[in-house]
Amino acid sequence: FNVDGVRITDFKKWANKLCPVIKADEKGQNYICAIAHQNIAVEARRSRQPVIAECDAGLMKLVVPIFVNGEFLGVAGGCGYILGNGEVDTFMVNKTIGIVEEKLMNLSDDIPVMTQEQAQSHTEFIQYELDQILKEYENSK
C-alpha cells in the first residue's frame, strides 16, 4: 500500500470467505477496510514499527512500514485472520453492509486464528523480506 493507503499491486489472496464480501460492498470497503487500513498505516508511519490490530469487523490487520532514506513509502502486510481470542463482529458487519447474520456466520465459520506470537513472527518475516529488497535496491545504484 502506498502512503495514501491505496493498494499498489493487483495480487489478492483472501484469507477467508468473509473479507471479499465486505470489500465488494462500497460501504464495507469504505467504512470497514479503508478506515482500518488508514488508521493502522498512520500508526506504523508514526511509530516506524510494525503494527498488529483489528478492523471494525474484528479481523486482524498487520503492517510493516517501508522507509527509504527516511522517507515513508507505504506499508506491506496482510489481514483477514482472527487474532487470538478475538471474534468476528457480525452485528457490526450486518449493520454496515446489510448481510443477514446467519449468512455472515456461514462466511465466518472457518476463518483461521492467529496468535499474537504468530502475528509478530509474520511481521518479522515481512520486515526481513523488505530489508532484503531494500538492500538489493541500494546495491544496484
Image (tube, helix red, strand yellow):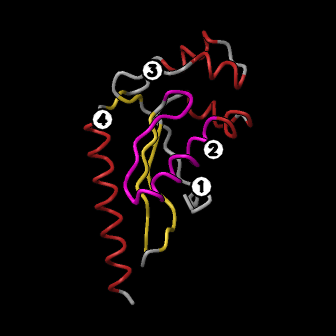
Start-end of magenta stretch? 32-58
User: Residue 131 vs residue 44: left or right?
Assistant: left
Q: Nearer the viewer, residue 101 or 91?
A: 91
Graded by Cα atoms within 10 Å as few (under 14), some (14 to 19) or many (20 or more), the crowding at tag 4 reads some
Q: Earlier in the sequence, mark 3 or mark 4?
A: 3
Give the residue type that dot 4 points to.
Gln
Which residue, given by chain and number where applicable, does mark 4 sit on? 116
Q: Residues within 10 Å of mark 3 (few under 14, many from 20)?
A: some
> Label 2's element?
helix
Is 87 in front, or is 101? 87
* Quadrant in which residue 9 is drawn: bottom right
x, y percent for residue 44: 45, 54
Q: CA distance from mark 2 to mark 1?
A: 8 Å
Residue occupying the point 57% across, 41% down = 36
**Which mark, by number, is residue 34?**
2
Q: Is residue 10 magenta?
A: no
Which residue sits furthest front?
A: 46
Give x and y (percent) for residue 5.
59, 55
Q: Is residue 44 left or right of residue 26?
A: left
Residue 12, relative to residue 103: is it above or below? Answer: below
Which residue is more in the foreground, 14 or 131?
131
Q: Secondary structure under badge 3?
A: loop
Instruction: Return the residue nearer the eye: 12 or 131.
Output: 131
Residue at 54 percent across and 57 percent down: it is 1
Q: Which residue is mark 1?
A: 5
